[in-house]
Image (tube, rainbow, N blue to C red):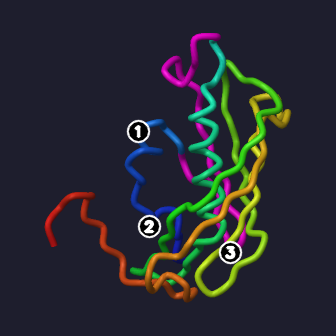
Amino acid sequence: MAYDPIAAEPPSPFPDLLGARLVAWRDGAATVELAIRAEHLNRSGIVHGGVLLTLMDQAGAYAGLYCDVPGRVRKAVTVDLDCRFTGQAREGKLRAEGRLVTRGGSIFFARTEIFGPDGALIAFGASTHRYRSGSEAPEGVPRDDRPAGTPA
């Protein structure tokens, strides 16, 4: 059976709380989906911009963090996130498609588009991410699947 990096990827606590799911992942591209729930809406009854920014951050970061080495992972921090909202959604499923633009020794750049349930573009943007120490190499670092805050 072939190694499945998505199945091996532990949930990221905040996006997991929102219900965001990594559904496609390869070197240079990632897709994150989210089924819209009532708690994702703002006072106007449309998806809150913070939800869209979270999807954009996740899809853009994953696009630069692919690692197909079992037991290893690549990590990064977001240093810049730029978004334009071009539409709205109230129900259904959102799809964020992140693509790697370029990467250097410690920084990578991504572009992300978010599509609403009808396939219309509702947001797009760009992000800059810095690799965590050791994650610059495609083989990444040994995976540590302990929950955040658990002592070593």
Q: Earlier in the sequence, mark 1 or mark 2?
A: 2
Mark 1: secondary structure: helix
Residue occupying image coordinates x 40% and y 60%: 10
Mark 2 to mark 3 CA distance (whole Å): 16 Å
Residue occupying image coordinates x 53% and y 76%: 131
Mark 3 to mark 1 CA distance (whole Å): 26 Å
Spot the residue most to the top: 44
Residues drawn in magenta: 21-44
What percent of the width, then of the height, locates residue 75?
48, 71
The front one of 4 and 90 is 90
Which picture quadrant has residue 104? bottom right
Which picture quadrant has residue 120? top right
Q: Is residue 42 above or below residue 143?
A: above
Residue that label 1 marks: 17
Residue that label 3 marks: 27
- Disc number lying in front (2 or 3): 3
Circle 2 Cα neighbour tier, 10 Å, few/some/many (<14 / 14–19 / ≥20): some
Mark 1 to mark 2 CA distance (whole Å): 18 Å
Residue occupying image coordinates x 52% and y 88%: 139
Mark 2: secondary structure: helix
Which image quarter holds the C terminus? bottom left
Is residue 104 within the magenta segment? no
What percent of the width, then of the height, locates residue 77?
50, 65
What percent of the width, then of the height, locates residue 12?
42, 53
What percent of the width, then of the height, locates residue 143?
36, 76
Label 1 near label 3: C-beta < 8 Å? Answer: no
Q: Which amino acid, mark 2?
A: Ala
Q: Which amino acid, mark 1?
A: Leu
Is residue 26 within the magenta segment? yes
Q: Earlier in the sequence, mark 3 or mark 1?
A: 1
Label 2 near label 1: C-beta < 8 Å? Answer: no
Residue occupying image coordinates x 72% and y 23%: 89
